[in-house]
Amino acid sequence: MSVSEELASFIVKASYDDLSSEAKTQLKIRVLDSLGCAIGAADADVIRRLRQHTDDFGGREHCTLIGGGRSAPDRAAFYNSALIRYLDFNDSYLAKHETCHPSDNLGAILAASEYVRGNGKDLLTAMGVAYQVQCRLSDEAPVRAKGFDHATQGAYAVAAGASKALGLNLEQTVNALAISGAAFNSLRVTRTGALSNWKGLAYPNTAFGAVHGSFLAMRGITGPREVFEGNKGFMEAIAGFFHIDWSKEDMERVTRTILKKFNAEIHSQSALEGILDLKSSHGFRGEEIANIEVEVFDVAYHIIGGGEEGDKTAVHTKEEADHSLPYLIAVAALDGQVMPEQFRLERIQRWDVQSLLRRVRVRPNSAYSDRFPSKLQCRTSVTLHNGTVLVKEKRDYKGFYTNPMNWDDVAGKFRHLGNRRIGTSLCSEIIDAVAGLEAISTEELLRLLALGT
């Protein structure tokens, strides 16, 4: 039996009853969190351009677009995924050598579920499958060090979730995995150097393609079933040999994913909580700061601290800002928060943050690196012009799986992101709908998400 057949068997057999009570709760929390991120991104310039693109190219109006309108399933998967991803405020999963955002799969699963008039239980089951596939591939088949992006494993996760939502049989699911896995292998250059809009759109593009591939498989189109272990397949060309016994997998990995308290790259969260704790306790002003030093684990240093993925003091755009630890620490010290407001162009360009970010030094700490990913340890030191040194060490943050956000925390985040855009009443309706997701259809949820424009 090929690896794709083993994985497809896991997907086809998975059921809502296989999810533990905790997994069901955590999946609903992540659906709400993701939808808040989507609503909060709706007025971004990049999103407006994507909407023009989607409306121009169109397609049969099978599926709902968040914010209103309808399009073809693959277009809806792309647009809704882009909304969820754009703020870079959705959840994450940390493996030793890979980081991913499993809620990136929600836009695709919403489209597939709506197409077949699925219900909330079907949606949660498909999400549980997608989370498990993406997280376990991140554990066992990391690709970042080989120069590939986490959207590479995402091709299999989207195909898994979409296939489950569509109710594909074993043979169709094998082909959906094979088509998507062979076609979508994203390069890590997406997140290195001078960052572009593509940082937030690479995974939505994978969602677009993998949903398309899943529908092709539904119609009988075949793919290379030895996509994992075959000659020049995923193992030989990219990941190296690995083994996952899919017959023994559950759908509990969602309980190890983490949520973002701050609108910033995931590895920055504990450091941001640290600098904000210091600001809250000591009340210093930006002009009082001489310099800031942050010790972090090596993954944070290399991705957002100025290590192997490039200089992080040249910050001119939203994409560069949310992946620059010097900018994030500086703007937190100045503004006392890191939310979407901190990524407006006029805020990024102001002299105060541009000056301070160049006085933020980031360096790796080998002891912290050894404890990653079970801890997000960091040490932040703020030196004031009067010689005072303020220090804060953190091992996690509110949102990490050792200190998780609960339903009320995420509902508060949802309201912060949504109230201005859609109003308090509609926010409450959506929160209630997600809380009772098992009792409604996907179409009913999306009907609410189409309002408020």
Image (cartoon, rainbow, N blue to C red):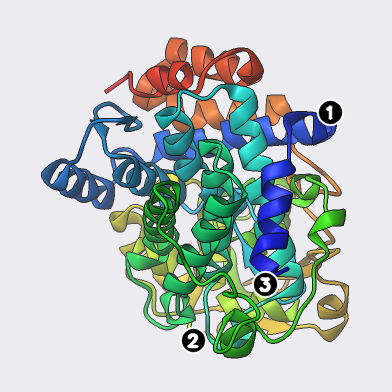
Which residue is under mark 2?
310
For label 2, the SS is loop
The residue lying at 64 percent from left, 32 percent from top is: 124
Label 3 Cα neighbours within 10 Å, binned few <14 / some 14-19 / many ≥20: many
The residue lying at 73 percent from left, 34 percent from top is: 15
**Who is closer to the viewer here, 43 or 15?**
15
Kindly report which numbered mark, 1 or 2, lies closer to the viewer in this rendering: 1
At which x and y percent is residue 214?
45, 51
Q: Amino acid at mark 3?
A: Glu
> Do labels 1 and 2 touch, CB within 8 Å?
no
For label 3, the SS is strand
Where is residue 156, by image quadrant?
bottom right
Residue 293 visible in the snapshot: no
Which residue is under mark 3?
98
**Who is closer to the viewer here, 59 or 168?**
168
Residue 211 visible in the snapshot: yes
- Horizontal relation, residue 393 to residue 281: left or right: right
Which residue is under mark 1?
21
In this rendering, the count of numbered labels is: 3
**Who is closer to the viewer here, 128 or 204?**
128
Residue 419 drawn above or below residue 194: above
Residue 98 drawn above or below residue 441: below
- Extreme residue toward the left, this view: 56
Q: Amino acid at mark 1?
A: Ser
At which x and y percent is residue 46?
26, 53
In 3D space, how far apart are the residues under numbered discs 3 and 2 (Cα atoms)? 18 Å
For label 1, the SS is helix
